[in-house]
Every structure is written in structure tokens, then in C-alpha cells.
Amino acid sequence: MHRPGWLLLLALAAGCAAHHAPTLTAPTGPGSSDWGAVRALPKGAFVFVTLDGNRTRQGGLGDVTDAGLTIRDVYGMNTIARYEIVRVANRVQTGTKRAPWYAGVPCMSLILGGLSTVIVGAVQKDGDVRRAGWLTFGIGMMVGAATGPLDYPRPTFEDRLVYVRP
């Protein structure tokens, strides 16, 4: 009897652990070979810096000097020399999107089906049917709570090429 509860808890915990760092998508735009384009970015802008050897660093933009730039990433503040930088891409929010309307249909079906089963079980005075209805209703409510954030607007991003080493 405890197995389904543990499986549900494991599934929810796995969903919470699925967060990961953003990955660079194919940047748009031609980019510039002028270092002034990087200087024009606002402090704190999220950038992807591609280095020699096709290594990538990402983080919030700090200070930009003629000698290089500083980014804040998970390791702290890191200074990168300009001669190491191959290109710089800036992540820009382009809008928001919502989950499709039909994402909530299975959840609502569980909730309404469970409630109607509870009513039928109460009318028929059948405890097993009532318990099954409450179980179905409860599962529908848990699924609704777990998938509720799907309906909130989520930002959409685009990576724009800012600088390409000449």
C-alpha cells in the first residue's frame, strides 16, 4: 500500500531535480568584430563566452576592459583575457509563452471523474466505490498541484551574437 506513495514522491522529486544550466543555442545575428559591442552590453547581462579550444563559459557580465572581461558564474567572479575570447553571445528575452490549453484536460478529467464517482458511491451506499472516487479525486488534485506551474507564463529567450574575434 505504501509503494504508490513512494513512487509518486520519487517522481515529484525527480522533476524538481531536473533543473540545469542554460545551454547555448545557435546565436542569431552577424556579430561584430568591434570590442565596443561587448562594452555596450549592460552590466549583469547573461552572456556565453566561447574561448579558444571551443570551451564555453557563461554567466552575468561584470566589468569589460580593453584587456578582457569579467563574468560572474557558479564559481564566483572570473576574469577572461580578451585574446582567449573567440566570440560573445548575449541571451535576450524575446517574449513569454504559456502551456497549451489542453494540458489541464487530463487533470480536470480525474478531478471531475473522482467527484462523480464519490457521488455515485454515496447514492448507492457503496463504500468501495466512494473510496475509489476519493482516491481518483486525490490523484487529480496532486497532478493538478504538480502541473499547475505549466500554466504560468514562461519567458522565451534568444541568443544574439555580439562579438566575433577578427
Image (cartoon, grey):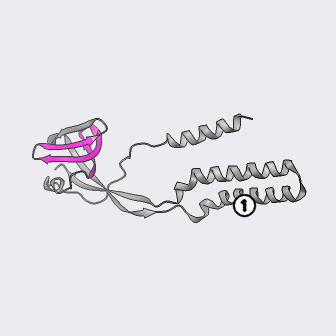
**Percent coordinates x, y for residue 17 in the rendering:** 49, 39
Residue 54 percent location from the top left of the image = 29, 40
Residue 25, x across and y down, in percent: 37, 51
* Type of secondary structure dominating the magenta stretch: strand
Give the total of numbered labels: 1
Give me the residue at 37% from left, 57% from top.
Answer: 157
Q: Residue at 66% of width from left, 57% of height from top?
A: 107
* In front of the other: 67 or 146: 146
Front residue of this view, candidates 137 and 93: 137
Could you say which quadrant of the image residue 14 lies in?
top right
Instruction: Give the residue at mark 1.
Output: 112
Left or right of 49? Residue 132 is right
Chain part drawn in magenta: 45-72
Residue 72 against residue 117 in the figure, above or below: above
Query: Is 44 positioned to the left or the right of 63 in the image?
Result: right
Q: In the rendered structure, does residue 102 fall within the stretch colored magenta?
A: no
Quadrant (top left, top right, bottom left, bottom right) of the N terminus: top right
Task: Specify the amino acid type for callout 1.
Answer: Leu
Q: Residues within 10 Å of mark 1 (few under 14, many from 20)?
A: some
Which one is nearer the viewer's eye here, 39 or 87?
39
Image x and y of residue 10, in percent? 60, 37
Helix, strand or loop at mark 1: helix
Residue 61 in magenta stretch: yes
